[in-house]
Image (cartoon, rainbow, N blue to C red):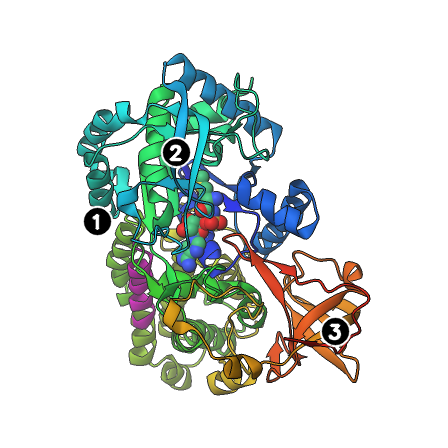
Amino acid sequence: MQPFYVTTPIYYVNDLPHIGHIYSTVVTDTIARYHRLTGDPTRFLTGTDEHGQNIEKAAAAQGVTPIALADRVVSRYQDLYRRFEISNDDFIRTTQQRHRHGVEAIVARIAAAGDLYVAKHEGWYCASCEAFYTEKELDAEKRCPVHGTATVWESEDNVFFRLSKYAAPLRTHYAKHPEFVRPESRLAEVVSFVKAGLNDLSVSRSKVTWGIPFPNHPGHVVYVWLDALSNYVTALGFGSPDAALYREFWENPEGCRVHVIGKDILRFHAVYWPAFLLSAGLPLPTTVWAHGWWLRDEKKISKSVGNVVRPDELVERFGPDALRYFLLREMTFGLDARFSDEAFLARYNADLANDLGNTVSRVAALCRQSFGGTPNELCTDNDILRAWSPARADWQAAMEECAFSRALEALWKFLAQINGFVVSREPWKIRKEEGTSSPRLHRVLSAAAEGVLLAAAALSPFAPATSRKIFETFGLPAKEPSGADLEWGRLPLETPMPDQPALFPRADAGAYLSGKEGTMSDQTPVAPPAAPADDRISIEEFQKVKLSTAKITAAERVPKSNRLLRLQVDLGSEQRQMVAGIAAQYEPEQLVGRNVVVVANLKPAKLMGVESNGMVLAAAVGEAGAPVLVDVPADVPPGSKVK
Ligand code: MSP
C-alpha cells in the first residue's frame, strides 16, 4: 500500500469538453479507482486552467469577463464529470487564491535558487500553444508544429528561468528513472529534445494581464504554463499553512505521483515541470504518462480542426459506462486511435450487450428461475475458480502498466470462460433431471454467479455503475467494491434477486446511424484549418452558398445538451428553426432580437433530435474555436443577401 496521487491535465476554459478531454479524465479516473480497489491511499486531482491570452481573448470577444467565461465552462465540466462518475477528490481552478499563493511560493523558491533574470525576449510565438518556438521547429512559413497556424514574432522584456542549467540534471534523472516518462517511445523523444540543448525559458508575460501577477515584477504576469503546472502541488496545499496533503502525496518518498497527459503537452510536463521542481528543490513526479490522440478523419479531434465529437449525445443514448468502456477498450494506451460512430456501436453490441450483458442476464435468470434467488451453497472446486487466478493476474498486471485494453481483454476472456462453463454444465438439464434442490445445480450456478461478481469487481474501475448493478442483481448492496470483492466467496446465499433491466439493451446500429442524419461531430460553424493556396474556390462556387441576414426571434436550450440552442429566426420572407452550438457562450435570453448571418440553403440536419434548417455563422476564436456570433447592425432588415 503506497500513497498514490494521480492527476489529469487541467483543462482550458475556452472550450467545452469533447471526447479527447473526457478520455484523459476517464483514464485518470480508472487509474484512481483501480488504486482504491487495491487498497492504496489514493488522491485524484483534476481542474481547470483559466489564465492566459486565449481565455482573455475569448472572453473579450464574447463581451464577458474572463472569470464569467470560466465559471460557465467550469460548471459544464463539473456536470459532465458527475454524469461520468468521475471520482476526483479535488477540483482546482487556477483562479483560486490557494493556487495563487502556491504559485507565489514556487516562484519565490525559484528566485531564491538564483534561477530568474530579466532580459529581452524575442521569438516566434504561437498564441494557441502560448509558447515560443525556435526557427528549427517551424516550417518555411513559420507555422506552429502543433496547430499548423502562423506564429508571430514577439519581442518584450521578460523574466527568464535558467532552464539551460537543468539540461544535465534532467538527463541524469531520465537515465536513472526510465519510468519517468511513459510509454518508452515518448521518453526517447524527451531525451533527444533535451540532448539538443535547452534555452532559458521566458516565464513572465507583460502583454497579458489575465494571470497571476509576477512577484516583484510589476506589469508582468506569471507565464501560463508555470502557473498551470504548479496546480499539481498547489492543490495539495503547497505554500499554504496546511500542507498535510502535500506531505502525504508529494513529499512522501514512499508515494507514487502520476500525471496523465496527452502527447501534445509532453514537453511541458517532462522538461519544464521537472526543471521548475528541481530549481525549487521539490520532489519530481514519478511518472508522466502521455497518451495518444483520438483522431477523426486522420486528424486530432480538436475544436481548431473543427472535427470534435461531444460526449453528450452518446452518453444520453447509451449511458456513461458504454462510452467509458469504449474509450478504454478501443485505444491502446499511448497510441492514437480513430473515433467512429460505427466502431462505437460495434463494440457496444458485441462486447457490452452480448458478451457482458448476456452473460450476466443468463446466469441471473437461471438462478431466479431455479431458486427465486441465489443458490444455497458455495462452490470451491470448479473451473471458474481455477480460471479466475490467471485472469486476475493478467488483469492486474495490465492495470499496473496502464494497459487498459489488455486488462479488459483478460476480463472478457474470463467472461467467455464463465459462459463456456454454463454451456458445458447445462444447468437447465440438471434442473429438469434432478429438480431445483439438486446440490449439483446449486454448485454450478453458484460458481457461475461468483465468476460474474468477480468480473464485476474487476470491471468497476472502468464501468462503476455497471459493476454496482451487477452486485445488486445478485443480492449484494450496490456499493463500490473493495479488494475483498476480488476474492472468491462473496456471493450471498439464498438471497432474493431483484429483477433488473438489461445492462446494455442491444442497439439497432443501422437505425441509429441513419437516424442521426449526420455525424456526432459538432456542427458549430468553425474556421477551417489554414487552407493551402490551391484550395481557393471560384466566385461561382462561393455564390452557391446563400448567406442571408436574419433576426433571432426566440431561443431556448436543447434539452439534455450542454451545447446546443434551438433558435427561431426570421429570414424576412420566412421563419426557420436552426440549432446552434453556442450554449456555452450565450444565454438564450441574450439572443432574442439579435441580427445574425445565416447559411440559408443548407440541407436540414438533426442535432440531438432537433431539426436544424440552416446555420448561424460565428467566428471561431482561439485554439478552442469558441463561437462568437457574426453581428449585423440592427437597421439591416432580415433576409438581406450577404455577398
Ligand atoms: N491547459 C492545458 C493543460 C495544462 S496541465 C498543467 C491543456 N488543456 S487542453 O484543454 O487543451 O487539453 C487537455 C488535455 O486534453 C490534454 O492532455 C490534451 O492532450 C487532451 N486532448 C485534447 N484533445 C485530444 C484528443 N483529440 N485526443 C486525446 N486527448 C486530447 O492542454
The circle on residue 259 is none
Residue farthest front in this picture = 539
Image quadrant holding the C terminus, namely bottom right
Q: Would you place residue 227 above or below residue 352 in this image?
A: above
- Ligand 1 contact, mark 3 (Cβ < 8 Å): no
Q: Nearer the viewer, residue 151 or 339?
A: 151
Q: What kind of secondary structure does the magenta stretch mostly adopt?
A: helix
Residue 402 left/right relative to 435: left
Camera sees residue 283: no
* Quarter of image, res 135: top left
**Would you say residue 51 is visible in this rendering?**
yes
Residue 185 - label? 1
Q: Which residues are magenta?
A: 403-416
**Picture disc at residue 122:** 2
Gap in Å between the C-alphas at discs 1 and 3?
A: 53 Å
Q: Nearer the viewer, residue 202 or 557?
A: 202
Residue at position x 51%, y 46% from top? Answer: 11
Q: Looking at the picture, which amino acid does disc 1 mark?
A: Ser
Instruction: Give the foreground label among 1 and 3.
Output: 3
> Mark number for residue 550?
3
Q: Quadrant of residue 292?
A: bottom left
Near-viewer residue (33 or 312):
312
Question: Identity of the amino acid at label 2?
Answer: Glu
